[in-house]
Amino acid sequence: MKKITIAIDGFSSSGKSSMARQLAATIGYAYIDSGAMYRAVALYCLENDIITGDGIIDTERLEKCLPQINIGFEVNPVSGRSEVTLNGVNVENCIRTLEISNVVSRVAAVPAVRHAMVAIQQQLGIKKGIVMDGRDIGTTVFPDAEMKIYVNADAQVRAERRYKELLEKGQSVEFDEVLKNVKERDYIDMTREESPLRKAPDAILLDNSHMTPEEQNEALLQIFKRITNA
Ligand code: CDP
């Protein structure tokens, strides 16, 4: 069967990544988490004092350093999942913290960062057969994607999901901090100049506030089958 490109965009902590990964596994496509790339760049910025903990960026230095920030993916041989690398080092376990979440959207709003990441993402999807999730996949990275989904859920619900996830990972966080971060990232992602978070006109809206993971996976699979006549 001819492979297509699948773009899944949406708000922070909306469960896009889980549903995108699950769909890719079910249909035998590659899965790329574009947010992990921006998180890895944010990690580089924090490690090299290009951004302060409260989000003040030295944009000029960041632009100069960009050629030295190599972002890639490698497959974890145990889980089979693709994991993000920063200059050849697997940083998957360091990028999902609230510390990174608190600065990532500011890093991702820098146009030069976006141009560099979008170029890598387009290269990764050149042969199709890919599910990519993010904020601008259906609008900027793959505007011709055959299947586009725009995911949303109530901010309170999204913060509860992320809070639970962080606690399960052993991170000590306050719920109010997580909710504040979710709302702040929504705002920055929607109002930035360069490829802001928007629903592509041809994207299908999926509100998963009241869906179980199984229900949302099934909904996505049905959309895929309909689009591909499978
Ligand atoms: O926390 P969540 O999983 O929802 O976010 P993520 O997918 O890991 O993305 C982290 C951040 O990267 C987002 O809040 C956006 O600011 C930024 N991002 C972006 O600007 N464009 C993308 N295609 C993906 C992520």
Image: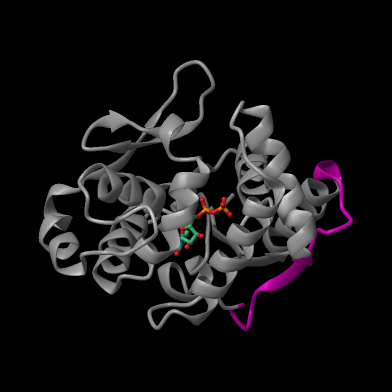
Q: Is the magenta stretch mostly helix, strand or loop?
A: loop
Nearer to me, 90 or 218? 90
The answer, for residue 55, to whether it is visible in the render is yes
Q: Is residue 1 one of those drawn in magenta?
A: no
Nearer to me, 221 or 225? 221
Q: Point out residue 17 in the picture as x, y percentages from the top left corner.
A: 60, 47
- Looking at the picture, the colour scheme in use is one colour
Which residues fall within the magenta stretch? Answer: 199-214
Check the image and report above or below for 204 versus 102: below
Q: Point out residue 52 in the picture as x, y percentages from the top left corner.
A: 31, 55
- State the residue lying farthest toward the right: 210
Residue at point 68% right, 50% down? 15
The answer, for residue 146, to whether it is visible in the render is no
Q: Point out residue 84 in the picture as x, y percentages from the top left corner.
A: 38, 38
Nearer to me, 10 or 216? 10
Residue at point 40% right, 83% down? 193
Residue at point 31% right, 70% down? 110
- Left or right of 112, for residue 20: right
> How many discs appear?
0
Residue at point 13% right, 62% down? 61
Check the image and report above or below for 118 versus 78: below
Nearer to me, 97 or 205? 97
Q: Point out residue 79 in the picture as x, y percentages from the top left corner.
A: 54, 21
Quarter of image, res 38: bottom left
- Left or right of 220, for residue 111: left
